[in-house]
Amino acid sequence: MLGSLIKKLGPEDRKKVQSLLADRKACEKILSTPEAQELIRKFTGGKK
């Protein structure tokens, strides 16, 4: 699913996303935000 979303991005945005995904600390920082936590709850049906 993520791969198909990335393919829809322009070349520059695709590079940015791939670079971000390769940086574990940056991913952890983003995923720990309240906004990301809320999205995760929505996608998982309210489960943690």
Image: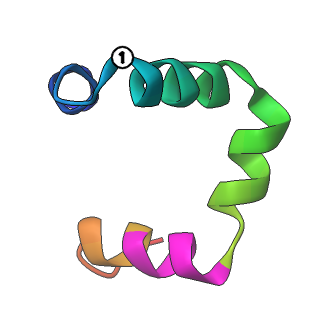
Residue sitting nearer the eye, 44 or 4: 4
Magenta span has 37?
Answer: yes
Query: SS at mark 1?
Result: helix
Q: Quadrant of residue 30?
A: bottom right
Residue 47 visible from this viewpoint: no
Residue 20 percent coordinates (x, y): 64, 31
Residue 28 percent coordinates (x, y): 75, 48
Residue, disc 1: 11
Side (left or right) of 1 relative to 33: left
Magenta span has 44?
Answer: no
Q: Quadrant of residue 11?
A: top left
The magenta stretch is: 34-39
Extreme right residue here? Answer: 25
* Position above or below: 7 against 41: above
Specify the color scheme.
rainbow
The residue under the point 15% across, 24% down is 4
The residue under the point 43% across, 31% down is 13
Residue sitting nearer the eye, 48 or 21: 21
Residue sitting nearer the eye, 6 or 27: 6
Crowdedness of circle 1 by 10 Å Cα count: few (<14), some, many (20+)?
few
Q: Magenta stretch: dominant SS? A: helix
